[in-house]
Image: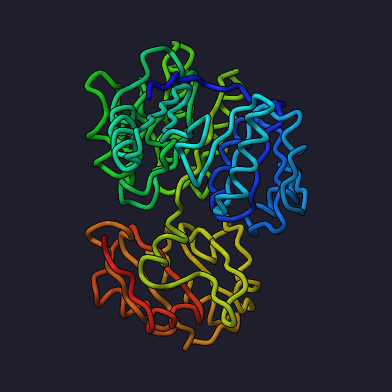
């Protein structure tokens, strides 16, 4: 059988989905992304589908299918496993000359859903003759090629603030990696995964932000100037930072500098080490019955410094988890201040060095002993400090490596 490939523009057009189970749960998000007006006909819905209905992204008719349901639909998706009921839906769609996708029987369908990958404005759909695994394998090969090659057209403009994640190059987002592959200029910090920089095209201008002189304040002004200057030259600039640009990454300052110069900015959040590093050491920052809150603070300024904006007495009173970034140098003063403000010296503490990388190390201690233990173990930056009872969860759980 020869198929005629076609892309549908479903924005504002009614699509009927019959069924409210796991198949419908997988199919509906793509229809939402296409802008379709979705009606789901089913006696019951999965929690995920119900959330779409509650958010106004779909309409639910809570009953079994009736032939008249297909009227006014541009497309019908049958997502039920009862062959007799599915045949009734496809017969009604056929009578009304509406294309119908059948999850239970592809040979009885008038339309198939392909294996799809999307990269920016490029959408690749792969159909198969019944060998779904082969279609997905071809799709994945094409997706890999698209990730490795920049767009042929000038698809991107301005500046993208991309979070590179906690250190493992596989923990950058798909969108972040795609924009990085399209960059003409990359301004990178020292904590970004080096493998990502090694994948850049030879002609990409790589600017090491760590080597910009004049001190931190002047260096940030120079970074802002570089971002605006290269973007105004018509180049696509990626500002790549470890973790997330907006968590102690000065991403807000860079976004404002671009906005003031009229340069468009795309923000791509990254996986922050404040959550990832503890998790990879077996420590959840929240845990039922242990901690219902967590606070992330910067420790690059000691508690007694005039420039500190942190309310250390308030943090000492918290029952939840305290995560300190960039605080290894000032850890002795931080621990001393928290104890002085009332936090027990027996409070569990963990320090995770270079989380998510092959060099990850973890140290367990208490608030009263952590300063000496860190010095004795030779822990060095970058490291994340976790303070609170959640640290003891690691006694019962050690994440597997992959």
On the image, the x and y values in percent for residue 137 come to: 29, 38
Q: Quadrant of the N terminus?
A: top left
> Is 273 rendered above or below residue 267?
below
Please indicate whether residue 353 sits to the left or right of residue 41 in the image: left
User: At 42% from the left edge and 49% from the top edge, which residue is drawn?
Assistant: 243
* In-front residue for pair 78/212: 78
On the image, the x and y values in percent for residue 91 come to: 63, 36
User: At 43% from the left edge and 72% from the top edge, which residue is drawn?
Assistant: 283
Quarter assignment of residue 368: bottom left
* In-front residue for pair 81/162: 81
User: At 45% from the left edge and 25% from the top edge, which residue is drawn?
Assistant: 123
Q: Which color mode does the image show? A: rainbow
* In-front residue for pair 22/202: 22
- Viewer can see residue 213: no
Please indicate whether residue 92 sits to the left or right of residue 336 in the image: right
> Is 171 rendered above or below residue 350?
above
Q: Quadrant of the C terminus?
A: bottom left
Q: How many numbered marks does the figure carry?
A: 0
- Viewer can see residue 308: yes
Quarter assignment of residue 212: top left
On the image, the x and y values in percent for residue 130 come to: 35, 38
On the image, the x and y values in percent for residue 356 come to: 32, 58
User: At 72% from the left edge and 57% from the top edge, which residue is drawn?
Assistant: 43
């Amino acid at each position: 059988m020869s198929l005629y490939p076609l892309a549908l523009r479903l924005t504002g057009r009614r699509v009927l989905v019959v069924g409210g189970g796991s198949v419908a749960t997988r199919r509906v998000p793509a229809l939402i992304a296409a802008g379709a007006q979705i009606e789901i006909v089913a006696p019951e819905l999965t929690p995920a589908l119900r959330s779409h209905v509650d958010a106004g992204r779909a309409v639910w008719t809570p009953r079994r299918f009736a032939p008249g349901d297909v009227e006014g639909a541009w497309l019908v998706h049958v997502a039920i496993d009862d062959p007799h009921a599915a045949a009734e839906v496809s017969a009604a769609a056929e009578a009304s000359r509406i294309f119908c996708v059948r999850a239970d029987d592809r040979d009885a369908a008038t339309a198939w859903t392909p294996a799809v990958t999307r990269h920016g404005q490029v959408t690749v759909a792969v159909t198969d003759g019944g060998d779904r695994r082969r279609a997905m394998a071809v799709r994945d090969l094409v997706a890999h090629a698209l990730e490795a090659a920049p767009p042929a057209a000038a698809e991107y403009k301005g500046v993208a603030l991309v979070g590179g994640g906690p250190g493992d190059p596989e923990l950058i987002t798909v969108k972040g990696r795609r924009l990085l592959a399209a960059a003409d200029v990359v301004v990178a910090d020292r904590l970004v995964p080096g493998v990502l920089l090694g994948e850049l095209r030879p002609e990409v201008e790589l600017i090491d932000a760590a080597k910009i002189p004049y001190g931190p304040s002047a260096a940030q002004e120079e970074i802002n100037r570089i971002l605006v200057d290269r973007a105004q030259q018509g180049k696509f600039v990626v500002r790549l930072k470890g973790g997330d640009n907006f968590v102690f990454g000065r991403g807000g300052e860079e976004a404002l500098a671009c906005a003031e110069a009229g340069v468009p900015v795309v923000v791509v959040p990254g996986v922050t080490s404040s959550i990832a590093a503890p998790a990879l050491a077996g420590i959840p920052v929240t845990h039922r019955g242990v901690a219902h809150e967590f606070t992330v603070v910067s420790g690059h300024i000691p508690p007694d410094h005039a420039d500190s904006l942190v309310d250390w007495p308030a943090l000492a009173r918290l029952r939840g988890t305290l995560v300190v970034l960039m605080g290894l140098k000032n850890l002795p003063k931080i621990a001393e201040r928290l104890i002085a403000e009332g936090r027990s010296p027996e409070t569990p503490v963990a320090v995770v060095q270079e989380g998510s990388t092959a060099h990850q190390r973890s140290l367990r201690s208490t608030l009263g002993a952590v300063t000496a233990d860190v010095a004795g173990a030779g822990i060095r930056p970058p490291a994340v400090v976790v303070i609170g009872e959640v640290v003891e969860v690691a006694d019962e759980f050690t994440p597997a490596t992959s």
